[in-house]
Amino acid sequence: MDSEKWDRRYRDTDLKEHQAPSVILEEQIKNLTPGKALDLAAGEGRNAIYLARQGWQVTAVDFSPVAVENGRGMAEHEGVSIAWNLADLADYLPEQEAFDLVCLFYLHVPRELFSKVLNKASGALRPGGTLLVVGHDLSNLTEGYGGPRTPDILYTPEDVTEILDFMQIKEARRESHPGDHGNTDREKIQIDCVVRAVKPVRS
């Protein structure tokens, strides 16, 4: 992963124009009781800020110094508190069994690293906690709009659930919706992979 590339992308952000959260996140958390949340690959924090506004105690992690700086500015502008960590997910180890919700949105990396990050994300969950994974589906390459053009870093619900075979899979599907990741065209349709899994409670 290249943090400098993402730094360049984030330098032009207008802090007064906070991006709306993912429509999928809004739908998925509406029935969850706020607790401690971990947002991995948080970017400038559009989802982290939304979670904080809903009463979650949020930790956000990203490897771009510019994104983290912008995220702090956006959170201050929105009047919410977020614990920011500047870290590469290849090396980052979250606190174990500390979170009620872990979000991983649009992390597109080689399969070995993706699997490693997913396993660390699940380890950060308390028993009964929810892991929410969203990304551009492999089918988006030929049938949807935006996202990476490299099939090796795209994935499907089946790919994710195979890695998370020790979790309770509550939902694993593809969702088509107007582009809402970054500065995508709202008139175009993107196809996302959506997986919601719960860490089993020990008997």
Image (cartoon, grey):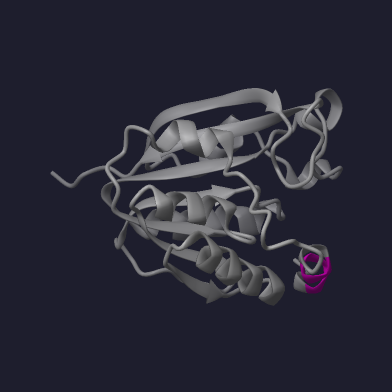
The span picked out in magenta is: 4-8
Q: Residue at x 38, y 58 (%)?
A: 123
Position of residue 174 measured from the top left corner of the image (x, y, whole percent): 62, 25
Foreground residue among 38 and 73: 73
172 shown above or below 105? above
Residue 72: x, y in percent?
56, 71
For residue 59, which quarter of the picture? bottom left
| Residue that appears at 32% across and 45% down | 199
Q: Is residue 94 magenta?
A: no
**Where 94 sits versus 43, above or below?**
below
136 vs 160, nearest the viewer? 136
In front of the other: 44 or 132:
44
Q: Quadrant of the C terminus?
A: top left
Q: Quadrant of residue 2?
A: bottom right
- Quadrant where the image shows the N terminus: bottom right
The secondary structure that most of the magenta stretch takes on is helix
Left or right of 87? Residue 122 is left
Coordinates of residue 154 in the picture (x, y in percent): 73, 41
Residue 161 appears in the rendering: no
Number of numbered tags placed on the structure image: 0
